[in-house]
Image: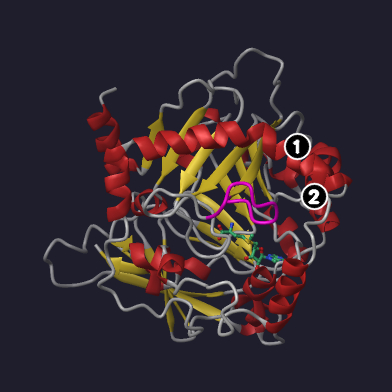
Amino acid sequence: MEISDELRSFEATGVYRLNVTGTGTGATFLDPVRLINGSYQRFRVIPSAYYSRSFEPPRQVGDPETEPPEKRRKRKRNQKSKPRELNAMERIAEARHQEVRHLLLSAHESLIKDKYLLERLSKMMEGKEHKLDVGSGSENNFVELGTSWRAPFYEITICFWKPHVLGHGEGSINARKTSFPLFNSIISVEAIDEAEGDFQNRHYILPRGSCFLMSDFERVRDLIPGSSNQGYNLIVVDPPWENGCVRQKEAYPTLPNRYLLYLPVQELAHPAGALLVLWITNREKLRMFVEKELLPSWGVKDPTVFYWLKVKHDGSLIGDLDLFHHRPYECLLLGYINVNTDAKQGSNFKLLEGPQVIMSVPGAHSRKPPLEKLLSEYIPGPKPPRCIELFARELFPGWTSWGNEPLHFQDSMYFSEK
Ligand code: SAM
């Protein structure tokens, strides 16, 4: 494929496949804003709202305005002391890093060499024209609201539009408004058009064919489909892992690892097969728990690892690749449920072939890039696949999203009308 064809396809889809020489491994650059916008008819995500992190003033190490006192003391202590030796677990993690380092560098090099893509990347921030209150704290805090005694009484009013009337100059807008309990109930949007919701003076954009359950962990079994052939073919899990990071504690509550053993992943999987994707952090102790206990308990064998390498708008990495506690990448473990992986190939899908590198500019803290397009050829079962995200903070067309704040990024402040 000519480079211009690949770029044209990138403009339309937000997915750009790169040639990584000498590694035999795939690398892909994703533009989450293009990916998300491809699925909306009447709205678009504002790039400067998605990439709000890039607009934050740079945090200066040692800046008394931005660095908490305890962190400052710890940093000074560390500066004085000699670099400490890694413990046994850290040495294993370092060895894993050394093993994948070449692959990550090669993938990154292929991005840096691609001047056409770099040019597009620098333009991705267009849309600054909107004054945003992203991060101002004016949005609803669903995590808090969901634990209040009032939670069972909160209702969201959803307006379902009839698109055949809209936009045909007939002057009348045909809409149906319905109220639903916001917490602990499964809410679905019809597949014809986006819907819009109102809750406590905030407005929400709901993609067509999306479905969500806003609840705490104890109601997660409500998601198990009544009939087994309604199971899911793509299951993405992005748990709130405990890792002691202060910024994460501010962003959302975490869960002890062992709770994850009670996620009903097998009951959610489609009998004709499911691809499971689990986001993990770089902590070795967590990796061992996941590989030895969690994935086997969900029926997943021999996971494949993908790496999400985070870059800035000039293509450079967001941080030093070799900094032990702040790697500029995260891992995803992928594996199959209800699929015979010993067979050479799946009946209507490709089996995962080995590690891959995904590159993108990160959005808000811990927000992951959308994966369905990138993974579509590896998803088993009927088409279009049925997809679910566990611990979601946003909705996608045709997906079910569960978590204690799945409407978080659906606030209208992230969108403008097309
Ligand atoms: N995948 C998301 C994204 O791309 O934006 C990020 C998910 S974040 C790592 C984990 C989510 O799990 C947070 O929204 C957090 O509030 C939620 N969470 C934490 N404890 C929970 C619980 N007990 N029940 C349900 N959700 C919970």
Q: Nearer the viewer, residue 83 or 58?
A: 83
**Residue neighbourhood size for the residue with mark 1, other residues' Cα within 10 Å, grouped as few (<14), some (14–19), many (≥20):** few
Q: Residue 175: image x %, image y %?
A: 31, 70
User: Which quadrant does ligand 1 occupy?
Assistant: bottom right
Residue drawn at x 75%, y 34% as measured from the top left: 300
In the rendered view, would you say 27 is above or below 323? above
Of the 4 image quadrants, the one containing the C terminus is bottom left
**Label 2 element class:** helix
Residue drawn at x 45%, y 60% as measured from the top left: 189
Q: Residue 99: image x %, image y %?
A: 68, 32
Q: Is residue 160 left or right of residue 288?
A: left
What mark, if any, has residue 95 been given in the picture? 1
Q: Is residue 284 left or right of residue 64?
A: right
Q: Residue 139: image x %, image y %?
A: 49, 81
Which of marks 1 and 2 precedes in the sequence?
Answer: 1
The reply to whether residue 376 is visible in this rendering is no
**Label 1 element class:** helix
The kind of secondary structure the magenta stretch mainly shows is loop
**In which quarter of the view is residue 73 placed?**
bottom right
**In which quarter of the view is residue 176 placed?**
bottom left
In the rendered view, would you say 174 is above or below 371? below
Residue drawn at x 54%, y 59% as measured from the top left: 367
In front: label 2 or label 1: 1
* Furthest residue toward top: 344
Q: Give the residues drawn in magenta, as a range.
A: 319-328
Residue drawn at x 59%, y 69% as measured from the top left: 405
Q: Nearer the viewer, residue 190 or 261?
A: 261
Specify the amino acid type for callout 1.
Ala
The residue that mark 2 highlights is: 286
